Amino acid sequence: MKHVAILGLGQFSKSVLTELLELKVEVFIIDKDRQAIDVYKDISAHAAVVDILTIDNLRRILPESTDAVIIDMGNSIEASILATSYCAKLHVKTIIAKAETSAHAEILELVGATKVVFPDKEAAKRITPILLSSVLLNYLPVSGNLVIAELPVPDVLIGKTLISAELRRRYQLNLLSIRETEGEFAACEPGYVFKRGDIGLFAGSDEDLNRFTTAPEKESWRKTLPEQFLQFFNRKQKK
């Protein structure tokens, strides 16, 4: 069983704690505010009211079996830097720290953070594409230019098998999973035939996903054009 310690109960770490409590993870929460700790007194997690701004306090209270720590000291940049540095000196393998600014993130990495997160920025990156798209249901930036998007299978794929759709060759996309109407996401075999109402999890770049989601609209739009304009459009495309 994994052992995770949460240092500081900010909004980000509270969200992480909620998720961890649903998993088979041993959680230990540490904060200097007793009222913040008391909110969780009835849940299955160990807790301690401690000021962790000294390495001796942290060494005394942090279990040796700790696999990872989540550091969220609210708006206190100095406290998060100190806590990150202390955890690194105590040889915690995985240190995930919340940053307030880019400069803060650089310092956190310098003192030992293995992963720095910007919850507000990352939430914005997930929400903005959904607001701007008429088809995206969910959107998750992974790293670099790679994203995972949840979206309805477009009309051009209905009736085709996964292998005949040639997603890799035509769109540079990978289909990770498929969810049929009112079903759950599941692996998709090469012979699976896409049906209307299917929802797919697709992985690729922003550019490739945009091309994939707009291609059906372009095809539909082209069919409504006058023939003489369509000929002109085709000539422009070939140049």
Image: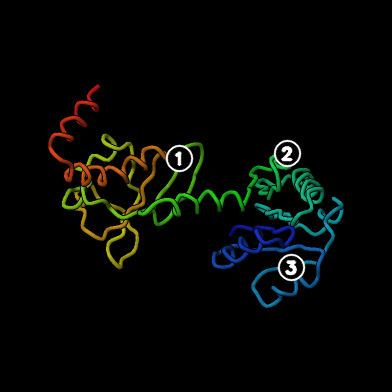
Residue at disc 2, secondary structure: helix
| Horizontal side, residue 151 vs residue 129: left or right | left
Residue positioned most to the left: 227
Q: Position of residue 48 (x, y in %)?
A: 78, 66
Which of the two marks, 3 or 1, is nearer to us in this view? 1
Residue at disc 1, secondary structure: strand
Which of the two marks, 1 or 2, is nearer to us in this view? 2
Quadrant that contains the N terminus: bottom right
Quadrant that contains the C terminus: top left
Q: Position of residue 182 (x, y in %)?
A: 30, 68
The residue that label 2 is drawn on is 103
106 over 57 or under it: above or below: above
Q: Position of residue 42 (x, y in %)?
A: 67, 78
Q: Amino acid at mark 1?
A: Leu
The crowding category of the residue bearing disc 2, from other C-alpha atoms within 10 Å (few below 14, some 14 to 19, many at least 20), is few
Q: Amino acid at mark 2?
A: Ala
- Between 196 and 50, the one lying in front of the other is 196
- Between 13 and 120, the one lying in front of the other is 120
The crowding category of the residue bearing disc 1, from other C-alpha atoms within 10 Å (few below 14, some 14 to 19, many at least 20), is some
The residue that label 3 is drawn on is 47
> What's the mark number on residue 146?
1
At 42% from the left and 40% from the top, the residue drawn is 206
Residue positioned most to the top: 239
Mark 2 or mark 1, which is nearer the start of the sequence?
2
